[in-house]
Image (cartoon, rainbow, N blue to C red):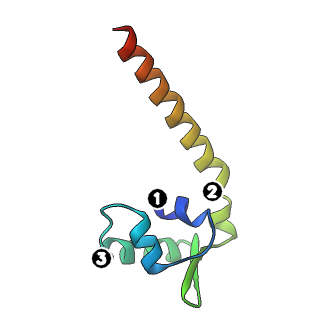
Amino acid sequence: MMIIWRLLEGPKRYVDLRESVEGLSERVLTQALAELSENGAVMRQGPKWRLTEAGEALRPALYELFAWGERMEMRASELASAG
């Protein structure tokens, strides 16, 4: 999911993707890009990877997941402060 999230910002080179996701090994990134490509979510265009139309269609769902995570983080913080 982090790879798609990074590609929502625009096309990225392999090395830029690897550096943008902390702890992501080359093997895992290569495997993830291959799977995402097979599933039609990403494609390689020259030296860069980009989202396909199908990958772009994930944007609303990912934004909603991010917003949900933010709400849950705030809620947990409020509960910790109250307790």
The Cα atoms of the two marked residues, 1 and 2, are separated by 12 Å
Tell me what residue is drawn at x 37 percent, y 75 percent: 31
Task: Count the marks.
Answer: 3
As rendered, which of 18 and 39 lies closer to the eye?
18
The Cα atoms of the two marked residues, 3 and 2, are separated by 24 Å
> Which numbered disc covers residue 27?
3
Number of residues whose C-alpha sits closer than 10 Å to that of mark 3, classed few (under 14), some (14–19) or many (20 or more): few
Task: Report the mark closest to the observer, 1 or 2.
Answer: 1
> Which numbered disc covers residue 58?
2
- Considering the numbered disc 3 on the image, is that residue within a helix, a strand or a loop? helix
Task: Report the mark closest to the observer, 3 or 2.
Answer: 3
Mark 2 or mark 3, which is nearer the start of the sequence? Answer: 3
In the displayed structure image, the side of residue 46 where residue 82 appears, left or right: left
* Quadrant in which the C terminus is drawn: top left
| Three-letter amino acid code of the residue under disc 3 | Arg
Tell me what residue is drawn at x 68 percent, y 59 percent: 57
